[in-house]
Image (spheres, rainbow, N blue to C red):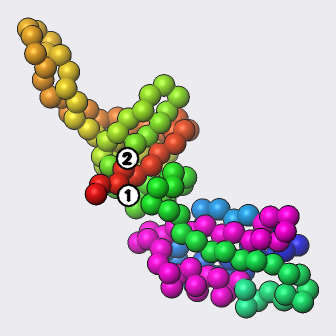
């Protein structure tokens, strides 16, 4: 019952903030509601407060006691939805598939797959030494086990 009410209120709040989208929502056995958001332009504190208020102010604690936590997807959180990839075009990703781990620049993302580009050193086809080669690969979302943005400091 609480979960359905929260989901309904959350959907209304997200309609008022079209750049925001839901990553995860859980309701624990102790009625702890946890909402994780992301946004096409990122998520700021005010966004979290607005969504939190939209939920909290429309629930009756007398009817059902609860705790509410609204957070943004962390910078080190794995990407989970195609919409998250689209907002990270141009950034470096580390992508794990069943057979390999690729680190490259995200150059494209649609609803089916992403495109990564990177440079690597490979042995020359003829003779000794290595040559720098530009690689490009499309990876279907169904192949991705985990993908994270690589942060530069």
Marks 2 and 1 in Cβ contact (< 8 Å): yes
Position of residue 23 measured from the top left corner of the image (x, y, whole percent): 60, 62
Residue 48 on the magenta span: yes
Q: Which residues are magenta?
A: 27-55
Position of residue 8 measured from the top left corner of the image (x, y, whole percent): 75, 77
The residue at 73%/64% (across/down) is 26
Q: Is residue 77 visible?
A: yes
Give the distance between the C-alpha atoms of the residues marked 2 and 1, in whole angstroms. Answer: 9 Å
Q: Which residue is mark 2?
A: 93
Q: Which residue is mark 1?
A: 88
In this rendering, the label closer to the viewer, 2 or 1: 2
Please state, as top left, top right, bottom left or bottom right, where the N terminus lies in the image. Answer: bottom right
Q: Secondary structure at mark 1?
A: loop
Q: Secondary structure at mark 2?
A: strand
Decide which of 32, 12 is in the foreground and name it.
32
The residue at 19%/26% (across/down) is 121
């Amino acid at each position: 019952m609480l979960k359905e009410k929260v989901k309904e209120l959350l959907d209304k709040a997200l309609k008022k903030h079209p750049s925001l989208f839901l990553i995860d929502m859980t309701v624990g056995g102790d009625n702890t509601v946890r909402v994780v958001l992301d946004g096409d332009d990122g998520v700021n504190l005010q966004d979290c407060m607005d969504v939190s208020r939209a939920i909290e102010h429309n629930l009756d604690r007398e009817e059902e006691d609860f705790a509410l936590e609204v957070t943004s997807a962390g910078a080190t959180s794995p990407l989970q939805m195609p919409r998250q990839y689209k907002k990270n075009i141009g950034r470096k990703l580390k992508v794990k598939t069943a057979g390999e781990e690729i680190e490259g620049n995200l150059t494209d993302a649609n609803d089916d797959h992403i495109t990564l580009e990177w440079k690597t050193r490979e042995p020359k086809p003829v003779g000794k030494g290595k040559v720098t080669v530009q690689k490009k690969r499309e990876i279907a979302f169904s192949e991705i086990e985990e993908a994270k943005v690589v942060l530069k400091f």
